[in-house]
Amino acid sequence: MKEKILIVDDEEDIREILQFNLENAGYEVACAESAEEALSVFTPAYSLILLDVMMEGMSGFKMAEVLRKEKKSQVPIIFLTARSGENDLLTGFSAGGDDYISKPFSIHEVLARVKAVIKRSNAHAAKEKEDEPIVAGHLRIDALKKMVYADGEAILLSKKEFEILNLLASHAGRVYSREEIIGELWKDAPYVLDRTVDVHIARIRSKLGTYKNYLTNRSGYGYCFSVTDNA
């Protein structure tokens, strides 16, 4: 799926140049000639906004504040402006900007900045998703607290037991071979035996009690996490 970019600038020539080059670079692009128009068409589907600062009516700084405070959006914003003083930079960043490009600009610089900001934003979103608790049936796995709860009651797992359960639950439905589990979780211990994984799995299942069937063994293949109705 293409990343969607919204260009907000009251200069038609700049909108056209940016749209042409960004679309050639593989992005899906929409344009607005004012902050007011941009706010009316904005959706969370956008991956980034290229936002002019000085426009008739609402300024780019004000639009950024509206997005951050009223719409609670964290979409990345790159400001475009002929003003490049230190105070302007500080105002832009305090308004919620992620980057700042001075006019006149090189289109190569714009493309590089756009790519870098989107990449950074996607990495942050992926990290946040990774840290979200996994809720599977009556089981809750909290990656930040390194805790597992069944029916609201804490289950005490060792560090390696938690890592195994979290790995399998994070990829529910996927079968991990013993070798893959060792490769993921014992990177610095090259002489770990397959039996070590089996022992840890057995301990996890015993601690899960009535929910032990969430961890299954696919004979000849490895282990899998899936929520079962008979747990």
Image: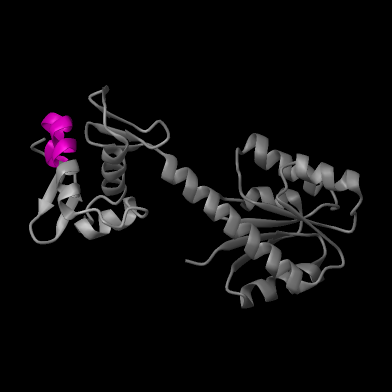
Q: Which residues are magenta?
A: 202-214
The answer to whether any part of residue 22 appears in the image is yes
Q: Pinpoint residue 10: horizontal percent, then vertical percent.
A: 81, 60
Q: Quadrant of residue 18?
A: bottom right
**Above or below — where is 51 with respect to 28?**
above
Classify residue 83 as left or right of residue 1.
right
Q: How many marks?
A: 0
**Above or below — where is 45 with respect to 145?**
below
Classify residue 171 as left or right of residue 120.
left
Give the colouring mode of the picture: one colour
Along the line of sight, the residue nearer the viewer: 215 or 203: 203
Q: Pinpoint residue 176: horizontal percent, then vertical percent.
A: 22, 57
- Specify whether residue 189 is painted magenta: no
Along the line of sight, the residue nearer the viewer: 96 or 189: 189
Q: Main secondary structure of the magenta part?
A: helix
Residue drawn at x 86%, y 52% as measured from the top left: 54
Classify residue 77 as left or right of residue 118.
right
Q: Pinpoint residue 124: horizontal percent, then vertical percent.
A: 54, 49
Along the line of sight, the residue nearer the viewer: 229 or 149: 149
Q: Pinpoint residue 64: horizontal percent, then vertical percent.
A: 72, 44
Residue drawn at x 32%, y 47% as measured from the top left: 170
**Above or below — where is 122 with respect to 66?**
below
Residue drawn at x 19%, y 51% as measured from the top left: 224
